[in-house]
Amino acid sequence: MTAATRPDRASHAARIMPGPAAIAEAMLAAGCRFFAGYPMTPFTEVLETMAARLPEVGGVCVNAESELEAVGMAWGAAATGTPAATGSTGQGLSLMQESLAEIVYARLPLVVLNMARAQGDYFQATRGGGHGDYRHLVLAPCDVPEAVELTQLAFHLAEKWRSPVLVMGDYYLAHTHQSVTVAPLDFGPLPPRDWALDGRSGGSGAAKLISPLSDAKQRHAAGRADAGYDLAEFYHRHVAVMERMVAEEPPRAETEFVEDAEVVVVAYGTPGAYVRQAVRELRAEGRRVGYVRPITLVPFPSEIVAAAAAGGRTVAVYENNQGQMLDDVRLAVLGAAPVRFIGGLSLDASGFGIAPDLDVAVLKARIAAVHDAAAPAGDAGHDGRGGAA
Amino acid sequence: MSGRTELPVIRTDAPPACAARLVHDFTPALIDVGAHHLCPGCGEPIAMRSMVEQVEELDQVRRAIAVFGIGCYTAYSNNLDIEVLQALHGRAPSLATGVKRCRPDTLVFTVQGDGDMVNEGLQEVLHAAARGENITCFMLNNGVFGETGGHMTAATVLGQRTKNTLDGRDAAQHGYPIRLADLIAQLDGAAYVARGAVNNAVNITRTNRMIKNAFRAQLEGRGFSFVEILTMCPTGWFVDTLDAPAYLDEALAATHRPGVLKDTSKPAAPVSALAPVVAPESAPASAKGTTA
């Protein structure tokens, strides 16, 4: 993990802020100067804050007429080298997928927020709802201060790899007030934006081109039988960059108590914070349980999960969906340990992720049940609640 | 078709009388490679030439950014010596919006076809026009999806034969064509709206002037400008290459009528005024014969 330095932290006092406002301030701190969005709960408050704040710092916020246009505008802004972002809720993200798939191949930095309702968009975020063979990084904060850090990191990674980076929020993050400090974070130097369009390379004989189809001009292909596109060569080159990004960018995860845990619980986002609390309380009660909270969903912290599961310990997965990250956990463990799903769709009547299951007592009971089933009878490491022989 | 110009036939059954030589390179300065693989008789290279020539004439070469849609004309996206941003099918106006908002000092224009703009991306161009977005959008209208091989678009005129309207577009089955320039001219954010054609020298000259006026509207910050350019697609029209310019006049231009539809640089054309509302008590008794 890159150690972020906080150069002028003292000048940025901690404030009680709602998640969306803190994320918006983090975007401004990261240099974002263009934002486009379409209202949708619980993304709306991010758009409201950006509409009010961006003009104050000389930026532009466009209230796009649709999510299709929002992502298009952000795409155009990104092509000029302006740090840009857009976002929505899962449904709106569905509309943006075609563009996101193309922006990956156009190699443009863009930060995309999914203020999701529950956790049903894991596949959309990590597999890509769009067409073609592509990947982009996905970051999943569990609370407002982490969202402030990861949102700024997203801008850094987007520019470093010239790729969209998705920040995966959720309903709780969008409606929670927390004490947070928003100070610009320095993640290190970035390559120059020499690819950005400003019109000035026109007439030079090598005018810039930003396209998901080609980065070679026809004259550069002179002498070939077909002086048009060579998509095969172009795609192969770009796939190599994507593979390098996923391989080189370190996976991030928070772990606790995994060294001697008999049950390791895997959860991300706000539910990950609830699981953390449930595991801590169970530890205090004498149960050998631990957790892994993936922070990067792409690249998935497979090795961290595998190491936590080493020795055939039981792995439990909690998600507020019917089991999506579950697949990645199974792939990480590769059959070396049993994997139990303790999540499930948990919504309020409006379909939002205000989950009745997101209750530490409920989670403790589920984890304890897995632990009871997993722990060998008479194991001294167990608290004996199950009845030592 | 009558009146066809007889062109000299080059004999290929005998060696040439003299060696071929380049008399002059007529490739516009801003088009990198003159050769293209669009069909013989296609109008799009002419329209493309007109656009880049106007960029040059207005001295905007080092300030221009073209945003391309997807169609046959996309062949030019990596063949220009001005900066190009390639968009998805239909989405060029929103990309152009993002570019222009971040680089207000550039000349930003989109190059799209009727399939791209009227079918896939209709809301994009209408919203950009309504916002008065200070960009220029060009639509190359040949009434077909040329790149897929000549299929019906929302701009295909009634009676026009396409690969999926083999007996001609029939309103009862396929609905009516959308006249996009007419639609855009109604929007308050549109500063300049015109429809040209490239099927003969006179129309090309007029179209060049329209393109220049559209760019001027943008350079003067007057708002959204739009030029629809009717182009030939003999392949997609099932007509002989040499008959295509005449077919454009007879078929396309009869529905999509060329002309300047709106120009805010000129005083509004006089509108026939409505008769003033007259109060009933002052109305002449004879007017309707119902006054007591």
Image (tube, rainbow, N blue to C red):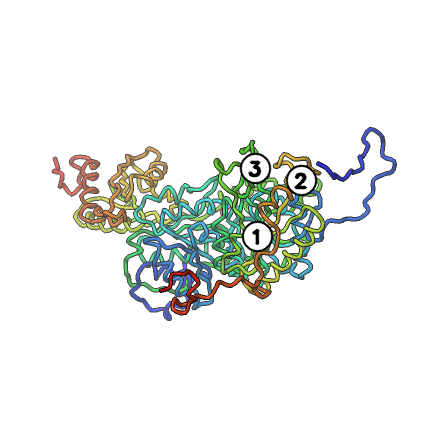
Q: Which residue is mark 2?
A: B244
Q: Quadrant of residue A153?
A: bottom left
Circle 3 residues within 10 Å: few <14, some 14–19, many ≥20: some
* Residue A201 in the figure: left or right of residue A110: right
Q: Chain of mark 3?
A: B
Secondary element at image label 1: strand
Q: Do marks 1 and 2 share a subunit?
A: yes
Q: Nearer the viewer, residue A301 or B18?
A: B18
Place of residue A210 in the rendered image (x, y in percent of width and height, measured from the top left): 57, 50
Q: Which residue is mark 3?
A: B159
Q: Chain of mark 2?
A: B
Residue at the extreme bottom of the image, as rendered? A11
Q: Chain of mark 1?
A: B
Q: CA distance from mark 2 to mark 3?
A: 16 Å
Question: Label 2 sits on what residue type?
Answer: Ala
* Residue A115 in the figure: left or right of residue B206: left
Relative to A113, say whether A120 is above or below: above
Place of residue A283 in the rendered image (x, y in percent of width and height, measured from the top left): 20, 48
Q: CA distance from mark 1 to mark 3?
A: 29 Å
Foreground: disc 1 or disc 2? 2
Q: Which residue is mark 1?
A: B110
Place of residue A7 in the rendered image (x, y in percent of width and height, measured from the top left): 42, 66
Q: Nearer the viewer, residue B58 or A151?
A: B58
Q: Nearer the viewer, residue B192 or B290?
A: B290
Question: Label 1 sits on what residue type?
Answer: Thr
Residue that appears at 21% across and 42% down: A367
